[in-house]
Image (cartoon, coloured by chain):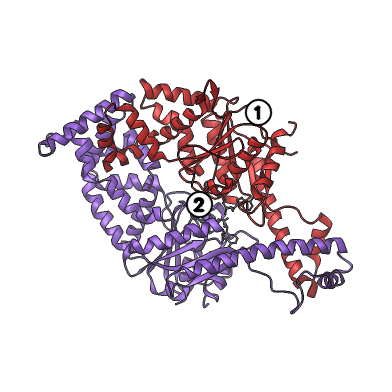
Chain colours: A red, B purple
Amino acid sequence: MPARLPLAAQRLVIVTGKGGVGKSAVTAALARALAGAGRRVLAVEVAHGGLGPLLGFDGLKATPRLVAPRLQAATLEPDDALADFVHGVFRFGMFARRLLESTSFQVLAAAAPGLPEFLVLHRLLGWVEERHLGRRAYDVVLVDAPASGHSLPLLAAPRTLGTFARIGPVAQVLRRVDELLGDATRTLVCLVTTPEELAVRETIELHGELVGRLGLPVAPPIVNALPPRRFGPDDEAALARLEGAAAGHPWVLAARHQVEHRRRALAQVATLRRALRTPVIRLPFLFAGPEAAGGVARLASDLAAAATRAA
Amino acid sequence: MTLADLVARHQIVISAGSGGVGKTTVAASLALWGALEGRRAVVLTIDPARRLATSLGLESLGSGERTISAEVFRAQGLAPRGTLAAMMLDQKGAWDALVERHAPPEARDRILTNRFYQHLSQSFAGSYEYMAIEQLCALAESGRYDLIVVDTPPTRHALDFLEAPRRIADFLDRKIIKWFVRPYFSAGWSALRAMNRTAGFLLRRLEQATGIAALAEISDFFSSMSGLFENFQTRIDRAHEILRAPGTALVLVSSPEEQVLGDAEYLSSKMSALRMPLKGVVLNRVHAEFRPGRRGRDEIGPEELEHVSALLGQTIGAAEAGELAANFVDYQALARGESLRIEQFRGGLPRGVPVVNVPNFSRDVHDLASLAGMHTHLFGTRAAA
Ligand SMILES: Nc1ncnc2c1ncn2[C@@H]1O[C@H](COP(=O)(O)OP(=O)(O)OP(=O)(O)O)[C@@H](O)[C@H]1O
Ligand SMILES: Nc1ncnc2c1ncn2[C@@H]1O[C@H](COP(=O)(O)OP(=O)(O)OP(=O)(O)O)[C@@H](O)[C@H]1O
Ligand SMILES: [Mg+2]
Ligand SMILES: [Mg+2]
């Protein structure tokens, strides 16, 4: 049974997973799929995750810009977010500059529990709530989040920082962020993984943390770069039986490689499904990579199918 | 120079690279090679796949060094002339141990229970890297090993690892104490009164305006820790020294994917700037091109199709032969793309740096026998038995 991507009217979609599993490729594909379905999308990469080129646009800036019909994109630098925040607190620019220029303050701000992550979320909340002429600026804000080691602190920030800030303006924003993140009608967290042991293990752990500890709305995991099926079961068996000159022919060697890789990948998919007790969304391995012409579009059409499929 | 020469001539080999490229696997394989060749080798691993950890005798975290027994080797058909030990990095444990070792007894509990410390020791960017280096220093100073292979944490840019000592040094920069400890706690701030008054004022403003009540607690942390900073500085200097010693070799592990190779290129250019030159490169999980079946033929032409159909006659039909051809074409395109990128990457490397390709095996590499199986590709030969 193929999984459904429970995307309806969400305002914030956060894509995360282990490093290098294809978060940026999936974000780009989701952005296209959602824009294609008529929604006005803002795709955001946090700290230069490599999203720009996949949207056909090198050098994203802090200010959103249109990269395709209905699709805007921007990059979010935690350092900029800190500067905005400090400038917002101090009425005199000089004080803010003074604090920001000190290495000690920078390091302290980076080390203060939950603060840098909070600042990122604060920016995202700003975009989600932004309105132009009484109308929402974006239907959905789509985030290419940092790799899971960093995304957990990001998503846990309202709690982490919450223990330090119980009253005051930060506490108020924290509550709004916390509400938004926990609200399944407005937020969806998508976990991306490859069908490989370490990535699958990390996904299972992350899923447990996000659902169990933080109570966030998490979509069925997206297994990216799954080697596609090319041969039927009978052919696979026949290929395995070949001997002599036939077995050494490059076409056969390449086919056996493919069959073996797919078998190994499916075993990981099974592990993932068993651990999370949920079907998964599958995206194919693209031989030419998602950067090649039509690559992102292909992934987008698969995701669009998963998003509209009857539950 | 070959990779074998490189391992033979160095006491410390660091396996660095982007996330998921095979750093941990390559580190284990290099250490195993050393042991087979008669060295007293140890591998310091970080977050290995479970089955690899088990193969190295590392069942649980914080278990210290484990030496792999002769029986275990024999069961895998291996007979090392030296020894192999393995150890897993335990970040939290390492921080606690540092505090226990360096903090004055009366400050110890205060530090260990400080919320900020607990956060810092688990999630401060760079502390993982720093702790790996800290444990490397301890291993190097123990004198128990003549080959130490160090795995590095999964960071997007391996540079984070190399810059860890500097970043930690920044963090512990005495300026921090000046700014944050003294305004709250210390009496001796007269020398920098004007500046500190501003700093203290700004901090209090920030605290009031934001409602973040952590700043006093953080200051408390720094004041409890101040005794530690002096010792840390010596450790950091020592870490720098070890990373730059002539007996230390940095080996870059990369996959042939475009983005990963880009990161690798950036890293190798930065490494010379840090005076930690790159000494070897392992390109892991490479798809080798298949050589054409028969010379002088169009690899996928109708003639070849006929040939294959005949070859496979009874087992596979013509339609399937066509699918075989299509799959082959995709595979070759992937392999060629990789080899072009690899060529270009090699062109940008300093001369004399050995570069080896390790194929993408169709099985996970997690037991000692398969780690030894990598040696043919890493060293062009298996270890002398
Ligand atoms: N479906 C796919 N088929 C083939 N290759 C893919 C696929 N998806 C991603 N890749 C490749 O995998 C690599 C990583 O992809 P991507 O940059 O999207 O990952 P990421 O998770 O965003 O990485 P990072 O953690 O570094 O930001 C890229 O080289 C990309 O070309
Ligand atoms: N040449 C290879 N062929 C096939 N599989 C491999 C190869 N090298 C490594 N692997 C497998 O790839 C996975 C990742 O390898 P490894 O853990 O060494 O990567 P890493 O760079 O240490 O990752 P991380 O950045 O997460 O620490 C493991 O399951 C390992 O068995
Ligand atoms: Mg990315
Ligand atoms: Mg590793």
Answer above or below: position of B116 versus B332: above
Residue B367 lies, in percent from the top left, at: 57, 61
Labels 1 and 2 share a subunit: no
Badge 1 density bin: few <14, some 14–19, many ≥20, Cα 10 Å: few
Tell me: is circle 1 under 8 Å from ligand 1.
Answer: no
The quarter of the image holding the N terminus of chain B is: bottom left
Q: Is residue B237 visible?
A: yes
Give the residue furthest to the left: B190
Identify the residue position indicated by label 1 in the image. Answer: A8
**Residue positioned 33% across, 44% down in the render:** B96
Residue B46: x, y in percent? 46, 53
Q: Quick one: A297 or A125, which is closer to the camera?
A: A297
**Callout 1: SS:** loop
**What is the distance, in whole Å, between disc 1 and disc 2 at their CAs?**
44 Å
| Residue at the outermost right position | B314
| Pair 1/2: label in front | 1
Q: Residue B59 carries which label?
A: 2
Amino acid under disc 1: Ala
What type is the residue that disc 2 sits on?
A: Glu
Residue at 67 percent of width and 53 percent of height: A286
Callout 2: residue from which chain?
B
Occupied quadrant, residue B7: bottom left
Asked whether B99 or A64 is in front, the reply is A64
- Ligand 2, by image quadrant, is bottom right
Where is residue B369 drawn, in percent x and y? 58, 66
Q: Identify the subunit bearing mark 1.
A: A
